[in-house]
Amino acid sequence: MTDGPGQLPPAAGDDDVTPAASQPVQADLTGPLGRSLTAPSAVLDEAHLGDIEGALGRIRQADQLSDSGWRRRLVTFLAIVGPGLIVMVGDNDAGGVATYAQAGQNYGYSLLWVLLLLIPVLIVNQEMVVRLGAVTGVGHARLIIERFGKFWGAFSVADLFLLNFLTIVTEFIGVSLALRYFGISPYISVPCGAAVLIGITVSGSFRRWERAMLLFIAVSLVLVPLVLLAHPHYGPIGYHFVVPGIRRGVSSDAILLIIAIVGTTVAPWQLFFQQSNVIDKRITPRFIGYERADTSLGAVVVVLGAAAILIVAVFAVRGTELAGHFTDALGVAEALRRHSRVLGALFAVVLLDASIIGAAAVTLSTSYAFGDVFGIRHSLHRKFSDARPFYASYATMIAVAAGIVLIPGAPLGLLTTAVQALAGVLLPSASVFLLLLCNDAEVLGPWLNPRWLNILASVIIGVLLALSATLVVTTLFPTLDSAKVAIGTAALLLGGGAATGGWLWLTRSRRPGPSRERATTTGEQRQNWRMPPLALLKPVAWSPGTKFGMALLRGYLVISALLLVVKAVQLGSG
């Protein structure tokens, strides 16, 4: 069923002629029990069809998976693992390292509980993305454009491109800070980092790219000896993981930092990246269970890594004048050097590694979206000569972002602030569209969200929306009290949620019941169900309540974007 890591698979699709992106690809595969799956498919790039070629193994689409033995399950999981783990660890990027370190340096262990609460948030959000990718075969950006119109598609994609580009700039800031610890000039470290990122991506092999990413993830395991050498206080750590609280009490700065922790851990680009990466890895509904496990593993790993960074930062400044006075991640490395040169060097390696993984994932998510929107070949299975615009978009973003970091006097602080604010603007719309797509029977058929998941996802979106609005408002108007803004926003959303819930209860008799297709579909049929070509889908029909909610969301986004432009002009003019 699988090939070992040392056996390279034959190239798939590199020299094939891809039909136009607007035309469905004819899938000619054999499913479980020998059932033919030949049918029009929504997949836009035929390189996304075929055997799964993972870093740790290969699965042929014709293989039968009826054997439930633990060895077969383990081998299959190892072949599938990748998209979920990479997207999660990639979120512990340069900005994440700085944010977690700031939490530890300024508030000790007291904010660990925030990280624990993020595990279910990450799993719920990304599990919906997994289903969308495996069932539809179409990227997140393309689905938004096709199902919700040009305005929402243009806004989501343009905002994603801008936000991701600014995020890539912050990753190169992380590269320069990390290697500055070792005395290496940014004029050497940044170009070298850019060359590494381009080199591992344009190789024309999904398997080689994924192996490189897993290698970088393995390097991040230096956090294990680092946190052990930091002499953690296990009693207080366990207490603050389960008991919410804030050291020195609730303050505007503490609330803003909590929002930053959530924002840097639950990022909009994750939705676009994992859906496209699942498609590029050729994961189909048969393997959704394994990809869910991959995603859950990644959620646990990312939270443990964030906690380790926070704990190390506590140790770095404990009992010194630096406690409560965070500057940047390099400052934490320098503080660790006071204890040991090895500790400082290990933290700098963690920062460098996080910046590389983050830059690779964020840039690739943008290139995937670029391919979806403009109908070009966009797969890591393709050679450079067969997908030049796709790889060129990746290399161009890397080169330009690296160049900005090297400009003398570039407003890097302003760019970092803009990343947080733009993430706050994009997150609500991205989360709302994700929930709407997962309740679209034309898109997911028998894989629609169950009711309990809709309720849980709605609560999570409400919390994210409150945090997002607070971050945007306090970024634009820093003199406002963050705690009061958060409380006011939460009260408004709670009132709106109660009103919406009441309306839904009153009108429940006029709404259609559960999907008949979902209720009558067998397990085997669900495993083989794929979304039809986009041109064959029925248009989206929004209820009056949904239209009203989307109008409110549009107003929020437009006003926030205008205020951000005004703020940027003010900051740029000094």
Image (cartoon, rainbow, N blue to C red):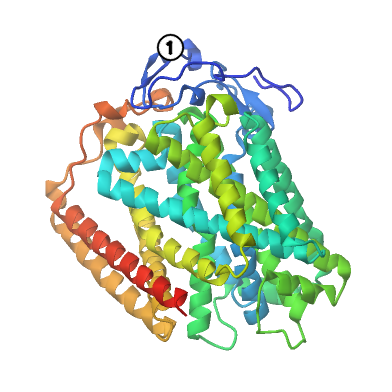
Give x and y (percent) for residue 351.
70, 61
Residue at 82% of width from left, 60% of height from top?
A: 225
Left/right of residue 326 with respect to residue 153 in the rendered view: right
In this view, the residue in front, 381 or 35, is 381
Please say if 247 is above or below 72. Answer: below
Is 343 on the left or on the right of 422, as rendered? right
The percent position of residue 299, horizontal first and vertical second, equals 58, 53
Q: Is residue 16 left or right of residue 108?
A: left
The disc labelled 1 sits on which kind of residue?
Ser
Q: Residue at x 30, y 62 (%)?
A: 557
Residue 546 in percent (x, y) is at 20, 53
In the picture, which quadrant includes the N terminus?
A: top right
Circle 1 crowding by C-alpha within 10 Å: few under 14, some 14–19, many from 20: some
The structure residue drawn at horizontal position 19% and vertical position 63%, both measured from the top left corner, is 502
Residue annotated with mark 1: 36
The kind of secondary structure element at disc 1 is loop
Q: Does residue 555 sit above or below 384 in this rendering?
A: below
Q: Which residue is situated farthest in the front direction here?
A: 408
Q: Please tell me which residue is depicted at 72% across the width and 70% down the height of the picture.
A: 330
Occupied quadrant, residue 6: top right
In this picture, is 159 found above or below 77?
Answer: below
* Quadrant position of residue 35: top left
Q: Return the x and y of residue 515 as percentages of the image width and height.
A: 25, 36
Rendered view: 80 above or below 404: above
Which quadrant of the structure image shows residue 523?
top left
Q: Is residue 460 visible?
A: yes
